[in-house]
């Protein structure tokens, strides 16, 4: 008998803790709501809209979940006061708004998971609309019909909340955890970001925890499983109310996700580094090609002329035959050097428009930034001039992507036939240049390109409104010249 009494009679410290949580439940609800709301706002402010990662395109839905769920938790705090002091009609309206916030937050979490799992297999394409369908079913069934046909408002609120958690909260959290795991494994692991990969795995575990705490631990009801697994039974077993554990789980989720958002910074940094490496390689290839054309080829050609002159002067048939073989070898070497020179040239096209389109498409692909391109038809230019213009455009694009933080970059290539001038403009809508910009390697390279083309570079920047880099070039000296 003593053992039985010890099983049902909880120790005094447990009762004290239980009473403390009961008295301070408003504080618990406030802190729990703040955790979710701060998580949502942090994600919303830090998420990169322009990213190749599907994770970025799904993050606004996770932010919506955090904000809406935080508002719901805060509403529960004020709901206790309303139930005690407000009229019944106002309480019903308040309860309806609370339920809508709860269901909308779960639907947003569900949609976050669906976005991360896309593209779905053909036989599961209908899954993309599942969050909306389940939300509509809940709105028509437990929410609207439950209120219209039921007589007990408290029972309606309890039932509608239970089915929101069962039908939207639990599957939404599970699908979100699956989506995070898929993105971490398929997209982030190959990028070799182990710390971020582990953070997103932690976030996935936190979402599974919330599937239980927020989706299965529901208000007590007469039907199964709410009659067994409910908030009251949970509190008896674990002393603290379920909101405490929901808040702790939400805190783990918030920290893991917010720290994991650094993946977008790392992704952009790595992609821009690749773009800059391509720029360095292009410059080096161009230098080698120029050195070959102006140095090695000319010297071999001069050696060939000397060998040809010696062949004409030689009287010994054996020497003439040897010099003839030498000429054949020199001519073969010149041909091989010219072939190698043509392979080194990155921009063999003499038409600037297609080369610029290719560059912009590459920049879009590796940075995820929206880039608008407008191109006039420009007369064909020499390969050297085309390479200089493309290098200028690449440098301007790289600077805009790296420093401007602009959602849109505009590239315009215009040609004025009457003036025989070409104008290339790269404009962003970002933060603008500082008042005294440092003339780093990039800007110096752009000025050097403009000088080599016989043109001018102008930079116009306004703080908070963006920067415009303009290359203005006369075409008389850089149009295509046929080599003799």
Image: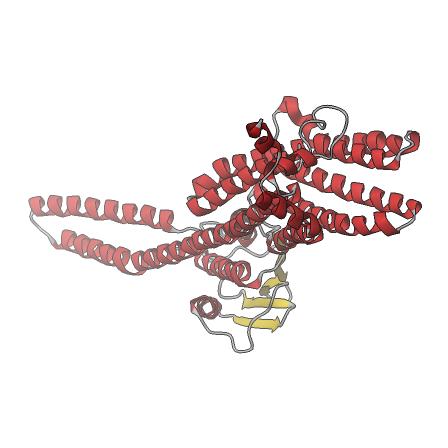
Residue 466, percent from left and from top: 62, 67
Q: Is 424 left, or right, of 271 in this rendering?
A: right
User: How many labels, in total?
Assistant: 0
Residue 57 appears in the rendering: no
The C terminus lies in quadrant: bottom left
- Which residue occupies 8% across, 47% down? 319
Nearest the eye: 249 or 234:
234
Estimate the x, y position of residue 314 in percent, counting from the top left: 10, 52
Residue 346 percent location from the top left of the image: 42, 50
- Looking at this view, is 381 or 370 the one in front? 370
Q: Nearer the viewer, residue 55 or 68?
A: 68
Instruction: Name which quarter of the figure residue 161 lies in.
Output: top right
Q: Nearer the viewer, residue 465 or 388?
A: 465
Vertical placement of residue 383 versus 240, above or below: below
Q: Among all residues in the image, which is located at the extreme top?
A: 123
**287, above or below 342, in the image:** below
């Amino acid at each position: 008998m003593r053992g039985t009494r010890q099983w049902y009679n909880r120790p005094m410290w447990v009762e004290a803790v239980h009473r403390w949580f009961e008295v301070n439940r408003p504080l618990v609800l406030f802190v729990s709501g703040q955790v979710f709301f701060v998580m949502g706002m942090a994600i919303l402010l830090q998420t990169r809209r322009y990213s190749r990662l599907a994770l970025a395109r799904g993050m606004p839905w996770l932010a919506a979940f955090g904000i809406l769920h935080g508002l719901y938790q805060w509403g529960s705090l004020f709901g206790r006061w309303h139930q005690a002091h407000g009229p019944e009609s106002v309480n019903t309206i308040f309860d309806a708004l609370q339920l809508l916030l709860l269901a909308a937050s779960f639907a947003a979490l569900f949609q976050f998971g669906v976005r991360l799992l896309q593209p779905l297999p053909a036989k599961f394409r209908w899954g993309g609309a599942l969050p909306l369908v389940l939300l509509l079913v809940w709105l028509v069934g437990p929410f609207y019909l439950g209120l219209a046909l039921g007589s007990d408002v408290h029972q309606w609120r309890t039932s509608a909340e239970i089915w929101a958690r069962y039908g939207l909260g639990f599957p939404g959290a599970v699908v979100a955890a699956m989506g995070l795991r898929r993105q971490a494994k398929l997209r982030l692991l190959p990028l070799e970001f182990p710390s971020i990969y582990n953070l997103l795995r932690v976030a996935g575990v936190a979402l599974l925890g919330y599937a239980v705490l927020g989706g299965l631990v529901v208000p007590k009801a007469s039907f199964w499983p709410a009659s067994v697994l409910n908030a009251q039974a949970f509190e008896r077993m674990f002393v603290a109310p379920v909101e405490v554990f929901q808040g702790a789980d939400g805190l783990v989720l918030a920290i893991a996700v917010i720290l994991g958002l650094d993946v977008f910074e790392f992704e952009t940094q790595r992609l821009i580094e690749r773009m800059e490496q391509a720029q360095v390689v292009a410059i080096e290839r161009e230098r080698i090609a120029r050195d070959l054309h102006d140095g090695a080829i000319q010297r071999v050609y001069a050696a060939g002329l000397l060998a040809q002159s010696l062949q004409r002067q030689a009287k010994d048939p054996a020497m003439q035959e040897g010099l003839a073989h030498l000429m054949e070898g020199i001519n073969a070497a010149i041909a091989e050097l010219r072939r190698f020179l043509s392979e080194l040239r990155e921009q063999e096209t003499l038409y600037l428009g297609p080369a610029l389109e290719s560059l912009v498409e590459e920049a879009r692909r590796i940075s995820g930034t929206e880039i608008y391109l407008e191109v006039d038809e420009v007369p064909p230019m020499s390969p050297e001039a085309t390479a200089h213009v493309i290098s200028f455009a690449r440098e301007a694009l790289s600077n805009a992507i790296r420093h401007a933080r602009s959602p849109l970059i505009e590239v315009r290539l215009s040609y004025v036939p009457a003036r025989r001038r070409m104008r290339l403009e790269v404009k962003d809508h970002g933060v603008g240049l500082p008042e005294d910009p440092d003339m780093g390697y990039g800007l110096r390279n752009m000025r050097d390109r403009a000088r080599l083309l016989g043109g001018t570079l102008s930079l116009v920047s306004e703080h908070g409104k963006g920067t415009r880099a303009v290359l203005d070039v006369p075409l008389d000296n850089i149009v295509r010249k046929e080599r003799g």
